């Protein structure tokens, strides 16, 4: 029998178990060896106008930013030419690690984001939108910080196409989440970079607009570290923040935050 220990656990293994178990991974479950540095999850829903440029930008930027990566495109039931364009891109770029999953039933961004983490093989995990939201320089600036913290949070210093009421609404949402959670995060709904294990381990049950804030707050409650980086972005989609589904999602997120804050006060971490 062999024993191994960390400052949190002590584990005992039979002689046979030592032959196949990754002992470091047993002590640090989120540190198991990964085949790649980064998994890029690309959300796609009727993005025929931008999806090819999105993939081009991701490939060119990640070749600079990280030593190895894969791209997982999850199409959520597009009815335009998005699927055909991604298939063609895969055929024309056989040297790239690209996986396409087509949902036969629309599952929503939050569920696809979680699914992509389970499909991936990268140590780190980043959300990309199929409408080419981040220019290559922003992707590089964010992804080059992988490994310096558990979460890299982009704070979009300049968002082309997002002004006036939408900026006010975004700022009000951030203030509200920080007020309830006690955090000082500048922006919750960006395209963050996470340790992939954390998304699999701590993913929330929130859906819709509030799921990213729920993930970040949950991870910070468990002691995760984060860095914020100021980068430009482009907003192409019309705002859907005030739909009844997203209002419900924000309410769900705030309720979860309040319950967890109360639980921490009563039971501790």
Image (tube, rainbow, N blue to C red):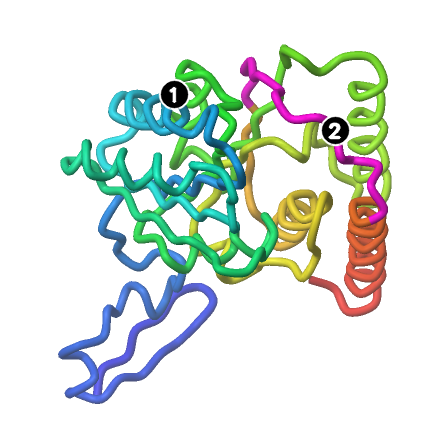
Q: At numbered mark 2, what does the secondary structure look like: helix, strand or loop?
A: loop
Quarter location, residue 19: bottom left
Task: Residue at 36% x, 45% y: name it.
Answer: 72
In the rendered image, the vertical position of residue 82 relative to residue 62, given as above or below: below
Q: From the image, tell me which residue sits under label 1.
A: 140
Task: Residue at 30% x, 48% y: name it.
Answer: 99
Q: Is residue 27 found left or right of 113 in the rendered image?
A: left
Around disc 2, counting alpha carbons within 10 Å, would you say few (fewer than 14), some (14 to 19), or many (20 or more)? few
Q: Quadrant of the N terminus?
A: bottom left
Residue 28 at what x, y percent from top left?
38, 62
In the rendered image, the vertical position of residue 178 relative to residue 245, given as above or below: above
- In the image, residue 10 lies in the stretch drawn in magenta: no
Q: CA distance from mark 1 to mark 2?
A: 26 Å
Q: At numbered mark 1, what does the secondary structure look like: helix, strand or loop?
A: helix
In the rendered image, the vertical position of residue 88 relative to residue 196, given as above or below: above
Residue 15 at what x, y percent from top left?
16, 87
Residue 160 at what x, y percent from top left?
63, 11
In the rendered image, the vertical position of residue 65 relative to residue 16, given as above or below: above
Task: Residue at 44% x, 47% y: name it.
Answer: 195
Residue 34 at what x, y percent from top left?
27, 53
Say whether disc 1 or disc 2 marks the residue closer to the N-terminus: 1
Q: Is residue 86 found left or right of 63 in the rendered image?
A: right
Around disc 1, counting alpha carbons within 10 Å, would you say few (fewer than 14), some (14 to 19), or many (20 or more)? many
Q: Which residues fall within the magenta stretch?
A: 229-244
Q: From the image, tell me which residue sits under label 2.
A: 239
Task: Residue at 79% x, 45% y: name it.
Answer: 246
Quarter location, residue 264: bottom right
């Amino acid at each position: 029998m062999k024993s191994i220990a960390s400052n949190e656990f002590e584990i005992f293994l039979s002689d046979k178990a030592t032959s196949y178990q990754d002992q470091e991974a047993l002590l640090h479950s989120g540190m198991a060896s990964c085949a790649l540095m980064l998994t890029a999850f690309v959300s796609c829903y009727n993005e025929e106008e931008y999806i090819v440029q999105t993939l081009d930008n991701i490939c060119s930027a990640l070749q600079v930013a990280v030593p190895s990566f894969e791209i997982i495109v999850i199409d959520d039931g597009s009815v335009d030419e998005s699927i055909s364009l991604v298939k063609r891109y895969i055929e024309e770029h056989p040297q790239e690690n690209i996986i396409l999953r087509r949902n036969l039933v629309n599952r929503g961004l939050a569920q696809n984001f979680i699914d992509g983490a389970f499909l991936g093989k990268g140590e780190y995990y980043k959300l990309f939108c199929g409408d080419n939201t981040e220019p290559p320089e922003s992707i590089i600036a964010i992804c080059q910080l992988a490994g310096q913290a558990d979460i890299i949070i982009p704070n979009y210093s300049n968002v082309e196409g997002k002004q006036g009421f939408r900026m006010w609404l975004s700022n009000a949402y951030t203030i509200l989440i920080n007020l309830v959670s006690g955090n000082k995060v500048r922006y919750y709904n960006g395209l963050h970079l996470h340790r992939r294990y954390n998304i699999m381990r701590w993913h929330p049950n929130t859906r819709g607009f509030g799921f990213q804030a729920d993930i970040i707050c949950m991870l910070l409650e468990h002691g995760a570290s984060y860095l914020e980086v100021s980068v430009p972005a482009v907003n192409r989609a019309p705002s859907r923040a005030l739909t009844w589904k997203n209002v419900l999602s924000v309410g769900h997120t705030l309720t979860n935050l309040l319950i967890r804050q109360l639980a921490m006060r009563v039971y501790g971490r």
